[in-house]
Amino acid sequence: MKDSSFEKTSAQRPTSGYNRREFFKGAGTAAAATAIAGGAGLAEAQEAGVAVVGPGMKKVTLDVNGQPREVAIEPRMSLLEALRYGCGLTGAKPVSIDASSGASNVWIDGKVASANTVLAIECVGKKIRTVESLGGDKPDAVVTAFVHNDAMQCGFCTPGFVVAVRNFLDQKPNATEEEIRAGLNGNLCRCGTYANVIMAALEVVKGGK
């Protein structure tokens, strides 16, 4: 005997309340673009007025170290990938995927962020600054101090540490050793050059002495 309760028509079945068009209206551009790349409704996103990127490569302009840089990206591409493979800036390193190492530190609109945890498409219109901006003919005092104190071995953690030290000392130019240790807690060095990094930071605090 059939149970008529299982014979509801599709019109009678309760709906989930999910609407892709409303999702795209409420989602950020990056989230919507990722969803589109994964096969969600392109038409719904466009109708909702969301800026659609992808599927496939698209050329965008990033403001990197004060210069416009045109790069070809996919919606899923991280800022780290765009910097390394699109701009040829290899200072930031792909050491970890969760920002735990600090090796891919860059500045985005003046705030330090891990380039491997940020989508490149999210950075269009923002000011990106990398460790390369601290080099050149007259390197930053932090770079010089790292050389003086031999604060690197394999070098993979070094760019992230340099960015972190520069950023921290911009905020606390007279920091103590204890404050420096706490301020650099988000950076890892497998070679164990922590002591030399601390000495380098203290050298900058003391004006190069």
Image (cartoon, grey):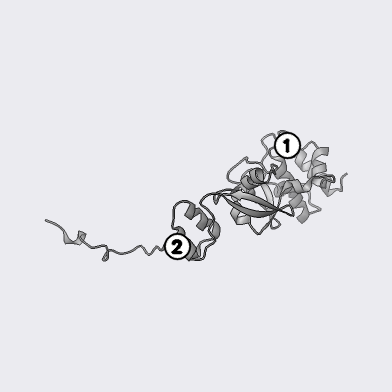
Of residue 164 and residue 95, the one placed in the foreground of this image is: 95
- Measured as percent of width and height from the top left, residue 120 is found at 61, 52
Residue type at mark 2 is Glu
The quadrant in which residue 19 appears is bottom left
At mark 1, the secondary structure is loop
Mark 1 residue crowding within 10 angstroms, few (<14) / some (14–19) / many (20+): some
In-image side of 68 versus 33 (left or right): right
**62 shown above or below 162:** below
Residue displayed at 73% across by 46% down: 131
Residue displayed at 84% across by 44% down: 137
In-image side of 5 versus 171 (left or right): left
In-image side of 187 versus 197 (left or right): left
Mark 2 residue crowding within 10 angstroms, few (<14) / some (14–19) / many (20+): some
User: Which of the two discs, 1 and 2, sits closer to the camera?
Assistant: 2
Tag of residue 54: none
Tag of residue 44: 2
The quadrant in which residue 111 appears is bottom right
Of residue 197 and residue 118, the one placed in the foreground of this image is: 118
At mark 2, the secondary structure is helix
Q: Quadrant of the C terminus?
A: top right
Residue displayed at 51% across by 65% down: 49
Question: Which of marks 2 and 1 precedes in the sequence?
Answer: 2
- Measured as percent of width and height from the top left, residue 149 is found at 81, 38
